[in-house]
Image (spheres, coloured by chain):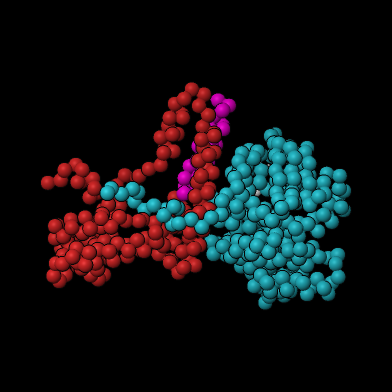
Amino acid sequence: MHTHHAYRVWNCCLSLKYGLMGLLAEEPLHGYEVKTRFEAMLGGTWEVNIGQVYTTLQRLERDGLVRPVGPRGDRGKLLYEVSEEGRRVLAEWMDQPDSGPQELREDIYVKLLLAARLANGDLAPLLSRQKRAYLQRLRDLNRLEERARRDGRSDLARLVRGALLHTEADIKWIDELSETAISGESE
Amino acid sequence: MSELVRLTEITKVYQGGVTGALNGVSLTVEEGEFTAVMGPSGSGKTTLLNLVAGLDRPTSGSVTVAGSDLGPLGETALARFRRDHIGFVFQFFHLLPNLTVLENVLIPAQLKSRVSSEAAGRELLAQLGIAELADRYPAKLSGGQQQRVSIARALINRPTLLLADEPTGALDTRSGDEVMELLRQLHRQGKTVLLVTHDAKLATRYAARVVSVMDGRIVDDARLETADREASDVIKVRGEETR
Ligand SMILES: Nc1ncnc2c1ncn2[C@@H]1O[C@H](COP(=O)(O)OP(=O)(O)OP(=O)(O)O)[C@@H](O)[C@H]1O
Ligand SMILES: [Mg+2]
């Protein structure tokens, strides 16, 4: 039975769970190897805590999705592989499109709503500051994408490209709000 | 760095225009800067670029480029100013169809010695990777090739300032990127570049300064940092973790 808390922990790191399984499906690995391989795959965009990797592996083992290869010795030396059931569950996850709600994590959404409630609230400075931050992010992402390409990491470049296009959309949104904020002044 | 362009309180009202195309624009550009000008359609970007290029005159305010105040200059002096200081790249290339590539490149060089400018033209085409196109006609070239020709034409007089108005607007992504890489190289060789674009990705990739224009006014002027950040400081996949 899941407590609310346990469910959240498991759910927060679904892609960690399946990411580790996916790497173990390629070949059996130790806990530490699977951690470094996972981080390398993500090109440093996700740093995982080793304790969390062990916890995840233990849960996967408990659920029969991975199993240790060879004798059970020191935890750090234990080699894990994916079970048949694990491969089936992994394939099912891979086939599933991501269809949850759109996640809007940044504070700007709440700031914007609060600012709009103020009498005579002027959104322009808020929008302008946010736009600058997005432009800087876009520049940083551009450099990261170029670096990934130079390093021959076209997989990582694809990930960065996704982030770039999201940030571009954020800028379009800010621009749209700015235009209505300015034309709204004369109402 | 020294100042190359200074616009002071510029307004521009076109004949028959109800509102101004530019309404009090002040802007300075330092030598060696790569600046992007962004803004919605009709916000005044092309107007701004044309005034800097001396292709048009402001209704009020002053334009100073490379130390010359353009206001008092007559048409001949203005043409000489353009020839000596400005390279202009247009969205739709503006090549003359009945001239060869090399002849197009040499248009702005007319007044100089024929032989030396022809050699310079060929060398420029070679630098831009299109030496073999010298004797062909523009209509037979791809958009990307035509834009390279127009860049060669913009560079033939070794201008101080390169103005590019949506230079990738008529190109597919790949030729657009190639053209932008050329502009980047030219900037690294010391050219000052003023680029008009709708594309924020492109602007921030090449320009460390982004000027935003809206309704004929500059609404923001952002100087961006150029830093090699750790991937984890730029992207975070899947947010925070629980321990
Ligand atoms: N030659 C002209 N005569 C009259 N009005 C003009 C002329 N050129 C531009 N305008 C007007 O001046 C305003 C600014 O035009 P401008 O071409 O500078 O905009 P822009 O930002 O370059 O737009 P776009 O992104 O569509 O190229 C617009 O309202 C436009 O209609
Ligand atoms: Mg224009």
Looking at the image, the residue that sits furthest to the left is A1
The residue that appears at 33% across and 48% down in the rendered structure is B240
Residue B72, quarter of picture: top right
Residue B36 is a magenta residue:
no
Instruction: Give the left or right position of residue B216, taking residue A126 as reference.
Output: right
Instruction: Give the left or right position of residue B82, taking residue B162 as reference.
Output: right
Instruction: Give the left or right position of residue B171, taking residue A60 as reference.
Output: right
Mark yes or no: residue A115 visible: yes
The residue that appears at 21% across and 67% down in the rendered structure is A77
The x and y percentages for residue A95 are 26, 59
| Magenta segment | A167-187
Residue A109, quarter of picture: top left
The x and y percentages for residue B133 are 68, 74
Residue A178 is a magenta residue:
yes
Q: From the image, give the main secondary structure of the stretch colored magenta.
A: helix
The chain painted red is A
Mark yes or no: residue B143 visible: no
The residue that appears at 39% across and 52% down in the rendered structure is B236
Looking at the image, the residue that sits furthest to the bottom is B132
The x and y percentages for residue A52 are 26, 54
Q: Nearer the viewer, residue B191 or B91?
A: B191
The x and y percentages for residue B155 are 73, 63
The chain painted cyan is B
Is A113 rendered above or below residue A27?
Answer: above
